[in-house]
Image: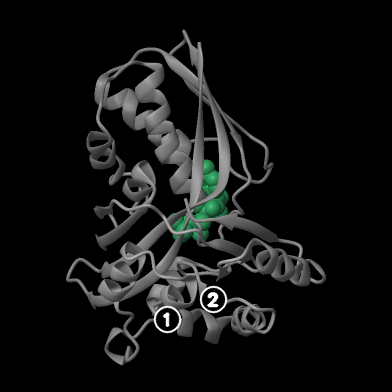
Amino acid sequence: MHVIEKARAKINLTLDVLYKRPDGYHEVEMVMQTIDLSDHLTLQHLEEDRIEISCSVPYIPTDERNLAYKAAALIKRTFQIKHGVHIHLDKKIPVAAGLAGGSSDAAAVLRGLNRLWKLHLSLDDLAHLAASIGSDVPFCVYGGTAIARGRGEQIERIHHTPPHVWVVLVKPPIAVSTADVYGALDVNAITDHPNTMAMLESLQANNPVAKISEHLGNVLERVTFRMHPEVERIKKKMYEFGAQGALMSGSGPTVFGIVDRESRAFRIYNAFRGFSREVYLSRFL
Ligand code: ATP
């Protein structure tokens, strides 16, 4: 008995930080968008009471540090399930990239085990559980387009037909620590807050990509750019190569460019392939 689940990457079309909370977390407001770059998960039922993880990428931990493991353990604990599961992760989403790869795997495990073990939980139930695994996991349970608030775990889903947008993603070969980026952020010094509502209205009105691009914004860019100037260079190149809009996703280091035409997306993709190893072509879903 097995089920297959896709775990899709997300990008931030906006990322705003409103203030630092007394509990140390930052209060955020972000427009999140699923793209069709996905990991493929196979969940195989085990009669024995254990969780096994295998992964196509050798350096990702397969023990309880893996977010997919955490999700399976949470389901087993919450519903007192005495069977086990083997989870294979075929990774396609770049790791530690700002694209929520691990969070999306965890969300896919929640959805997959719900089916495998016939738990009859709604997506809302799963999203509620998901918040204890990580801030990005509730959004990944739903996918699509949403506003995320709080630590990122409070999700307001946006129901609309996603516009036809091509996305080119470039991940430079550097590691960015999300904690370091938030740690170096001076919330009071933010002057260029993105307009979340304007982005939302633009998406819902099915505006052309050029219009949507006007509202892209991420207050973490400045911090990551200061730490890693090459990320800013990639963003500049994205525009030089013809992107209608470009932004860093999450705390980076991945930069994405958006365009309305496939041919233009391929041109940008090929231009980056000349000197960058991790380049991806995707679409809004
Ligand atoms: P976010 O956008 O939510 O900040 P990210 O895309 O930057 O996430 P991930 O790809 O989720 O980062 O990986 C971050 C770290 O988490 C990696 O260094 C990895 O060791 C660990 N990790 C745990 N589980 C997974 C998983 N299933 N897939 C990828 N990385 C995982």
Q: Is there CB contact under 8 Å for labels 2 and 1?
A: no
Q: Is mark 2 within 8 Å of ligand 1?
A: no
Question: Compared to 112, does 151 lie above or below?
Answer: below
Q: Residue furthest right?
A: 274
Is residue 97 or residue 144 the one in the foreground? Answer: 144
Q: Let me know if residue 65 appears in the view.
A: no
Question: Compared to 174, does 32 lie above or below?
Answer: above
Query: Which percent across, then down, holds residue 82?
Result: 35, 13
Residue at image point 59% right, 55% down? 282
Query: Which percent across, then down, holds residue 21?
Result: 19, 71
Query: Which percent across, then down, holds residue 29?
Result: 28, 68
Element under label 2?
A: strand
Residue at image point 46% right, 34% down? 69
Cα–Cα span, label 2 and label 1: 10 Å
Element under label 1?
A: loop
Q: Let me know if residue 188 appears in the view.
A: yes
Query: Which percent across, then down, holds residue 170?
Result: 65, 67
* Quadrant in which residue 67 is drawn: top left
- Specify whether 254 is left or right of 5: right
Q: Which mark is residue 91?
A: none
Residue at image point 56% right, 58% down? 96
Q: Which residue is mark 1?
A: 214
Residue at image point 50% right, 67% down? 177
* Quadrant in which residue 215 is drawn: bottom left
Q: Which residue is mark 2?
A: 246
Q: Mark 2: few, some, or many residues within 10 Å (few <14, many ≥20)?
A: many
Under mark 2, the amino acid is Ala
Question: Compared to 237, does 92 lie above or below?
Answer: above
Q: Earlier in the sequence, mark 2 or mark 1?
A: 1
Is residue 135 or residue 166 the one in the foreground? Answer: 166
